[in-house]
Image: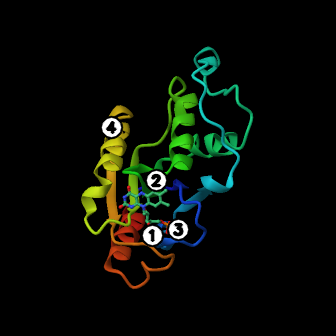
Amino acid sequence: MSDNIVLLSGSPRKNGNTDRLAAACIAGAKAAGKNVTVFRVADMNIAPCLNCNACFKHPGVCARKDDMAEIVAAILKADAMIFASPVYFFGVSAQLKTAIDRMYVLLKLGMPVKKAALLLTCGAPLIEAADPSIAMFRHIVSYQKWREAGIVVAPNLHEPGEIEGRPELAAPKKIGEEL
Ligand SMILES: Cc1cc2nc3c(=O)[nH]c(=O)nc-3n(C[C@H](O)[C@H](O)[C@H](O)COP(=O)(O)O)c2cc1C
């Protein structure tokens, strides 16, 4: 069981469907006594990775000085991660992808994270719209030798709050409890 969870939420829309999916997961985790540190990456100043490889010379130290440092510090104390995002043109949001790319700073140092979950919302009526995002997540999980701790896709969502009362809110709560 995880004690420290870091959740990166990638929707720019505050209290939108992705935030609500994430909130269900956070509620489950907190009810089970876990610490959850939530970062709404769209509200943070996080610049893209430059592939300068400075972090390979100085593991854990990024040449870019911005809000990503806060996330990196939290990941270094985390045993689990949750990624939440709306599907944007079949991928995760650019804001979330930018933060994920910046996790490159931890590749040489290594992360204490052991497992990860993925929460996605999309407008399409079929969950296949989320397949490329799921593929990306699974490659990261396998590359990092993490355990996949759950994937939830909530389709057919457009207006903020449309997800309320939907059955898809049950699965993230359970993932949070069991992570
Ligand atoms: C720029 C943009 C691109 C989108 N691309 C897709 C897409 O490729 N497939 C899809 O099913 N929905 C797409 N959507 C719809 C969102 O994924 C969906 O409305 C989601 O629930 C929004 O999450 P939010 O309420 O957290 O903002 C897109 C929305 C935006 C704004």
Q: Provide residue 149's location: percent of width, then percent of height.
A: 34, 54
Name the kind of residue labelled 4 in the image: His
99 vs 179: above or below: above
Mark 3 to mark 2 CA distance (whole Å): 11 Å
- Label 2 belongs to which residue? 83
Q: Residue at x 44, y 72 (%)?
A: 158
**Which one is nearer the viewer's eye here, 5 or 158?**
158
Dot 2 beta carbon under 8 Å from ligand 1: no
Say few, some or many: other residues with alpha carbon within 10 Å of mark 2 (under 14 / 14 to 19 / 20 or more): many
Name the kind of residue labelled 2 in the image: Phe
Q: Mark 4 touching mark 1, by CB under 8 A? A: no
Q: Provide residue 7's location: percent of width, then percent of height.
A: 53, 55
Name the kind of residue labelled 1 in the image: Leu
Q: What element carries label 3?
A: helix
Say few, some or many: other residues with alpha carbon within 10 Å of mark 4 (under 14 / 14 to 19 / 20 or more): few
136 vs 21: above or below: above
- Label 4 belongs to which residue? 139
